[in-house]
Image: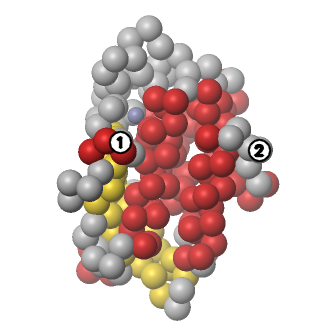
Amino acid sequence: MPDPASGSAGASGTSGAPDVGLDDLYRDILLDHYRSPRNHGQLDERATHGADGSNPLCGDELRVELAVEDGAIADVAIDGRGCSISQASASMMSVYVRERGTDEALRAVETFQQMMVAGETPPEDFADIEALMGVAKFPVRVKCASLAWKTLEQALTSSNGPESAVTTDERSMGDD
Ligand code: ZN
């Protein structure tokens, strides 16, 4: 199991970055989601949408399954492995999108990216997701944190039903 406190486990080429600089409160929130991921598991035949995401830079993998009913995410399940940031972000994402409209979920993907790339303050309803703010300063870690949201977006926008794939490493996109 990766060392959750370091956030660098599994990252190739990032030795010397043992700490992502999160403050203690945010670190506690993150570790809680990492150790006790919400909505963990599979929806199996109930899944109407799904995607497999990967962040090869760090070795993070994530599957997101959604049960969409009447334009809303009635249920969500996540299953994956990787660093604490990628898995905690997935747990936080799942809590946020559950029982929200798919359009609202897609807007949240954009909002999350703005928070990561432009350092914008997240809206209040992001709640625990705010704990990932500090990650924005570390571009390699941004790919870890973004994996859940990229995979969610892929699941919602793909026409392949529960089977599609996405990566946060742009260089290897298009191979699927
Ligand atoms: Zn990672």
Residue at 70 percent of width and 30 percent of height: 25
118 relative to 100, above or below: above
Circle 2: element type: loop
- Describe residue 10's horizontal placement relative to residue 3 as left or right: left
- Describe residue 20's horizontal placement relative to residue 126 as left or right: left
Ligand 1 located in image quadrant: top left
Residue 77 visible in the picture: no
| Quarter residue 8 falls in | top left
Q: Residue 121 carries which label?
A: 2
Residue type pointed to by label 1: Asp
Residue at 56 percent of width and 68 percent of height: 106
> For mark 1, what is the residue?
169
Local packing at callout 2 (Cα closer than 10 Å; few below 14, some 14-19, many 20+) is some
| Residue sitting at the far top | 16
The alpha-carbon separation of the residues under discs 2 and 1 comes to 25 Å
Q: In front: 30, or 109?
A: 109
